[in-house]
Image (cartoon, rainbow, N blue to C red):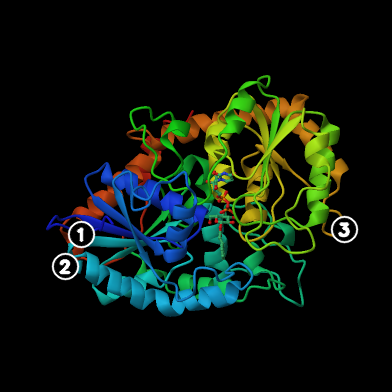
Amino acid sequence: MAQAEDKGEENHVLLVAFSAQGHINPMLRLGKRLTAKGVHVALATTEIARHRILKSSSTDAKAAYLVAGIKLLFFSDGLSLDYDRKTNLDLYMDSLGKHGPSNLSALIKEHYTSPKKLLCLVTNPFVPWVSDVAAEYNIPCAMLWIQPCALYAIYYRCFNKLSAFPTLTDPDMVVELPGLPSMEKEDLPSFVLPNNPFGSFPKLFSELFRGMEKFKWVLGNSFYELEKHVIDSMCELYPIRPIGPLVPPTLLGLDQELEDASVDMWKSDETCIEWLTQQPPCSVVYVSFGSIVVLPAKQMEAIATALKNAKRPFLWVVKPPEFPTPDGAGQLPLGFLEETKDQGQVVRWSPQTRVLSHPAVACFITHCGWNSMLETICSGIPLIAYPQWTDQPTNAKLIVDVFKIGVRIKKEVDGNMSSEVIEKCIEEVMVGPMAEQLRKTAMALKAKARIAVQAGGSSDENIRLFVEEITSDSREKDDSPKVGNLSHEGQDKVRDKDV
Ligand SMILES: O=c1ccn([C@@H]2O[C@H](COP(=O)(O)OP(=O)(O)O)[C@@H](O)[C@H]2O)c(=O)[nH]1
Ligand SMILES: O=C(/C=C/c1ccccc1)O[C@@H]1O[C@H](CO)[C@@H](O)[C@H](O)[C@H]1O
């Protein structure tokens, strides 16, 4: 097994990621941007990720430990590999918070001849305790915020009690925050609502956002031109430096960088690319709810009926639930595959970034996971939002009212979606003046994303600044938070490159 021994070299950064598909990959892509600037990078995550990566046979054993020059290291979250973490979320987060720090600390001792060789640790929001491990070794700590900067601003204000949020006595209040549109309760992240059933997340975020001084840098997986108002709104509080979008280089037109830094936790079904190639340009409705969401049977039925009635080619990712339940959640309605065999394809896991950038794909029905959204923005196609939990409701609000690149499936009063509403949304984004406008806006955002990551673009400049600061000798002399963005002057220069 390859190990992250430092072989006496200087300039190491250790990234620490929560073990989820949508958390590890943006961290790896940040790692790749750092290695490109001469930094040695390793990524530590929990054993459950190793287990999943090895099980997905598209990743061979060797690749499971080395990705685009980044070494992967694993530590235990204190639970057995077959434990149902998703159903017992609070217990999982508790165990990770209890066992993670000492196990990560042991990993650092084991893999680095001297922790002093580490320029910094970079963590993400679900493992905020990494900053305490960094402090134990006197290493500075950065956080990669892996959701929109809007979510960073909302949580910061909510958990520092800087603005009013819904309560049990006033559950329907409208939230007004600088740099963001007015938000009703269905637009807010589920973790700030009084009926949120997962107590571990408000506890985790409360500790994180009240102790932000532990992070010398906050980097964001977004780009300035996408979220400028909300990014600017955080300048006076605790600034966030956007360095994204952290998506595969092929989606960004970075042709000189062919290799992506990512892992697959499930084996993707490549046959759908062949199928897409047989479809007319801009005709296919792509549907996926990401790696975690499992839709109730009733909602699966509504989507199935809408796709059938829309009479358009579709590609639907139906990922079998890890722990199936007798109520049919996450399962296709009986007979659907047979009835639609000439109309569409169903796969268990798709090569999503290749799908989104395929000329046959017209739009994406999505749960609004932030990685999926960034990948779609970089592909320049419109979205149909059907958010479920966590950041997704706010991401849906951004799609419709801020980025203006999609529509949202409105829920019925019982909280379900009707097949008629889904079908209407499909028509809205496929044909007519609204569809045309959405597509135009989506293409313009795609162009802005590309400019942000190119040499001299806003995100590239923020990465350059970060590397300059972590590698400069200032560590001993200056421990103050380096949380500022580019100077306004610098930001203005970058802004002038707006398309
Ligand atoms: O069939 C699929 C579905 C999803 N993904 C990838 O899985 C990630 C999902 O992350 P996201 O933040 O969108 O949602 P999550 O799965 O974390 O809820 C994205 O990078 C997708 O490209 C994929 O490769 N194939
Ligand atoms: O937030 C998660 C994963 C949560 C999880 C998984 C397993 C057990 C407990 C919790 O994943 C997604 O991350 C994306 C980036 O933060 C986000 O945009 C998506 O909405 C999440 O689904």
| In-front residue for pair 81/290 | 81
Q: Residue at left 43%, top 46%?
A: 59
| In-front residue for pair 233/254 | 254
User: Dividing the image into four equal quarters, which quarter contains ligand 2?
Assistant: bottom right
Q: Nearer the viewer, mark 1 or mark 2?
A: 1
Is residue 313 depicted above or below 195 in this figure? above
Give the x, y percent position of residue 196. 68, 71
Is residue 198 depicted above or below 341 in this figure? below
Q: Quadrant of residue 322?
A: bottom right
Left or right, 184 with reference to 215: right
Q: Is mark 2 on a helix, strand or loop?
A: loop
Q: Quadrant of residue 428?
A: top right
Q: Is mark 1 on a helix, strand or loop?
A: loop
Q: What element carries label 3?
A: loop
Left or right, 216 with reference to 204: left
User: What residue type is disc 2 on?
Assistant: Ser
Q: Residue at left 59%, top 69%?
A: 84
Give the x, y percent position of residue 496. 42, 32
Q: Distance between the residues labelled 3 and 2?
A: 59 Å
User: What residue type is disc 3 on?
Assistant: Val
Say if mark 3 contacts mark 1, CB within 8 Å. Answer: no
Question: Quarter holding the N terminus?
Answer: bottom left
Question: Mark 2 highlights which residue?
Answer: 114
Give the x, y percent position of residue 238. 43, 62
Q: Does the image show residue 160?
A: no
Q: Residues within 10 Å of mark 2 (few under 14, many from 20)?
A: few
Question: Mark 1 highlights which residue?
Answer: 5
Q: Does the residue labelled 1 lie within 8 Å of ligand 1?
A: no
Q: Distance between the residues labelled 3 and 1?
A: 57 Å
Sequence-wise, which precedes: disc 3 or disc 1? 1
Sequence-wise, which precedes: disc 1 or disc 2? 1
Question: Mark 3 highlights which residue?
Answer: 413
